Amino acid sequence: MNRIARLLACVAAATLPLAAQAHHYWLLPSSTVLSAPQWITVDAAVSNDMFQFNHNALNVDALAIVAPDGSRLAPENLGKGKLRSTFDVNLAKPGTYRLEVVRGGVRATWKADGQPKRWMGNAEAFAKEVPADAEGLDVSESASRLETFVTVGAPSALKTTGRGLELAPVTHPNDLFAGETATFQFLADGKPAAGVEVTLVRGESRYRNQLDELKFTTDKDGRVAVKWPQAGMYWLDADLEDDKVTVKAAKRRTLSYTATLEVLPQ
Amino acid sequence: MRNWIHVASVPALLGGAVGSQAMAADLAVKLEIPRLNVAEYHRPYVAVWLERADQSVAANLAVWYDQKSKGAEGAGSKWLKDLRQWWRKSGRELQMPLDGVSGATRPAGEHQLGFSDGKAPLGRLAPGDYTLMIEAAREVGGRELVKVPLTWPPKAAQTLKAAGQHELGAISVELKP
């Protein structure tokens, strides 16, 4: 396996719900609500504890920064340390910026000469590199989206792409306040995703004894209503498994959506 | 407009007011910025506005912020978001500075503001229940929001009192029909 595929595999493994039991991954912006154009800095990491750099840096090769007008910005001062990646973004225009890391791929496990084999890569490489008649071949696809939002001035509308599991804001993600209820809609390939479990964990979990997870299940319209118990930076995760695959050998697809949301005090 | 005058005249008539109209109602606000014994003191940003019963903004009355901060243009407006409720309710939709509303930060002490019905920035308010909101946020300091409920237009002269705990001191609101 070449280096890129291995890198992909490492990061994608962290995005797969089955493999991600132990580690969470996240983007952490220095600000989410701004009253004048300015720089922000963002950390990206993989860890157990919310927003604590204590495991691995997140690979942000697939990072996209989408400006309010839909144009793309390049991150500046991008650096990768042992425990976190960091980058700066110059938010020069009013409106809402979306920072996203979107990934997808194929995962396969099989046995060769009695030894378990694991493979991760894109669909094209899969056809070339994984023996179609391998013993006990198990193939799945994954699609994950990691994102956060930052607004300069008034929040602007956010567009969904219609691919993978996404959050369609009913309440704008930069308009969240403790004690109030926010409504979010989850879409799978653009259609309301009912019955999806959504988990929220407030940051600074290292300063308390319980995770205090908030769990919700989307209704028939794919919606959840979250009443914020207190201000803070929250990590949101939603996972879904379906059979909408593109690779013939794959039996299932795992979809994951992860976001960092800031809830302000009243 | 015609509608409003009609409706607003009713309380005046019912109250047997001598004055012919309710048009001259006044709203005077006295607010105190407390003197704080802190190592690094910056004058607070302050916003004063009126909210309707549904919490929408009826009028922005005052916004004190650092308009002349050196550095990049809008350097002082960088901290307007710290007036968290005002920013969310109204500030983020506005282009600063606001004519007749915004001004420079003010020192510790008592400050008087006067507003008249029908005149900017109060304008003509539909009769009803309102809340006067006073929010203060201080660089390297705290933030505080004080709310004073009132009914407009006032039927009789009235003084409403409130007080902040740390970033705002005594607040008094005088209403005159």
Image: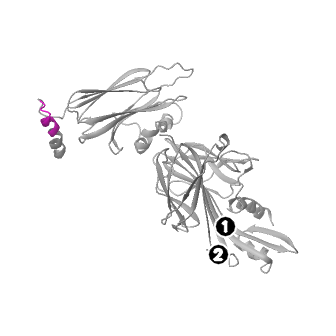
Q: Three-letter amino acid code at disc 1?
A: Ser
Left or right: where does residue A132 sit relative to residue A162? right
Left or right relative to B93: residue A57: right
Q: CA distance from mark 1 to mark 2?
A: 11 Å
Left or right: A132 in relation to B34: right
Does residue A26 lie above or below A264 as drawn? below
Q: Residues within 10 Å of mark 1 (few under 14, many from 20)?
A: many
Chain of the residue on which disc 1 is drawn: A
Q: Position of residue A157 (x, y in %)?
A: 47, 56
Q: Secondary structure at mark 2?
A: loop
Q: What's the chain of the residue with tag 2?
A: A
Residues in magenta?
A: B10-17
Observer-nearest of B29 and A72: B29
Whether residue A122 is visible to the viewer of this picture, yes or no, is: yes
User: Viewed as shown, does residue A21 lie left or right of B39?
Assistant: right
Residue B73 in view here? no
Instruction: Tell me the tag on residue A169.
Output: none
Mark 1 and mark 2 on one chain: yes
> Front-most of A260 and A151?
A260
Residue found 55% across the figure and 29% down from its top: B140
Residue bearing the label numbered 1: A142
Q: Which residue is mark 2?
A: A246
Indicate the colouring scheme: one colour
Q: Is B14 within the magenta?
A: yes
Identify which amino acid the numbered label 2 is placed on. Answer: Thr
User: Which image quadrant for residue A19?
Assistant: bottom right
Label 1 or label 2, whichever comes before in sequence order: 1
Mark 2 is surrounded, within 10 Å at the Cα level, by few (under 14), some (14 to 19) or many (20 or more) other residues, namely some
* Total numbered labels placed on residues in the image: 2
Dot 1 falls on a residue whose secondary structure is strand
Q: Position of residue A155 (x, y in %)?
A: 47, 50
Tell me if residue A229 is in the magenta stretch.
no
